[in-house]
Image (cartoon, rainbow, N blue to C red):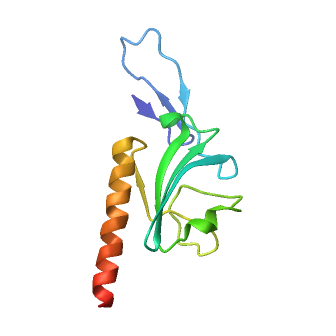
Amino acid sequence: MGVSCVGLEVWDTGNDCKNCKRVELINPDPYSFTIYKKVQIGKHCVCGVTYHNCTNYEGKKILLYKDTDISQFKLVEKLDPHFSEDKNGLYPFARFEPTEEGIEKAILLATLMDKLERDSDE
């Protein structure tokens, strides 16, 4: 298996690959998404998002947003799943495998973060 440094392409480099085909890995379009799950835990929000043009994991992403209220997602037009230090927009604090276990782990981390923050306020 090889990965191009120029573009996002994956191909098999083995000599025994007779029926291989090139697969393009497409970055998620931050303007083409559906939020299928939202869970508020204290000041943090866990979201399940499907990016319609993305091919890996059927476009599904599990994202944890730190210090973000669930209401901020109602009118959002751009939702980039990549990490960023940009303060203008919603960017995840953490990402998880897009499975039921991934959702459970995201909720667990958000719950732990909330507990630690509440304990430090006392």
Is residue 109 or residue 7 the one in the foreground?
A: 109
User: Percent from the top left, x then y, of residue 58?
Assistant: 53, 34
Q: Residue at x 59, y 75 (%)?
A: 87
> Splitting the image into 4 quarters, where does residue 27 fall?
top right
User: Percent from the top left, x then y, of residue 15?
Assistant: 37, 14
In the rendered image, which quarter contains the C terminus? bottom left
Instruction: Indicate left or right for 115 with 76 as reference.
Output: left
Instruction: Indicate left or right for 78 with 40 as reference.
Output: right
Toward the top, the furthest residue is 18
Instruction: Indicate left or right for 17 with 70 as reference.
Output: left
Q: Residue at x 64, y 39 (%)?
A: 52
Does residue 101 sit above or below 18 in this rendering?
below
Q: Residue at x 39, y 49 (%)?
A: 103
User: Percent from the top left, x then y, of residue 16?
Assistant: 36, 11
Is residue 52 or residue 14 the one in the foreground?
A: 52
Q: Residue at x 33, y 82 (%)?
A: 118
Does residue 59 sit above or below 77 in this rendering?
above
Q: How many marks?
A: 0
Is residue 86 or residue 13 the one in the foreground?
A: 86
Does residue 23 sit above or below 27 in this rendering?
above
User: Percent from the top left, x then y, of residue 46?
Assistant: 46, 59
In the rendered image, which quarter contains the N terminus? top left
Instruction: Indicate left or right for 106 with 71 as reference.
Output: left
Does residue 93 sit above or below 99 in this rendering?
below
> Splitting the image into 4 quarters, where does residue 74 fall?
bottom right
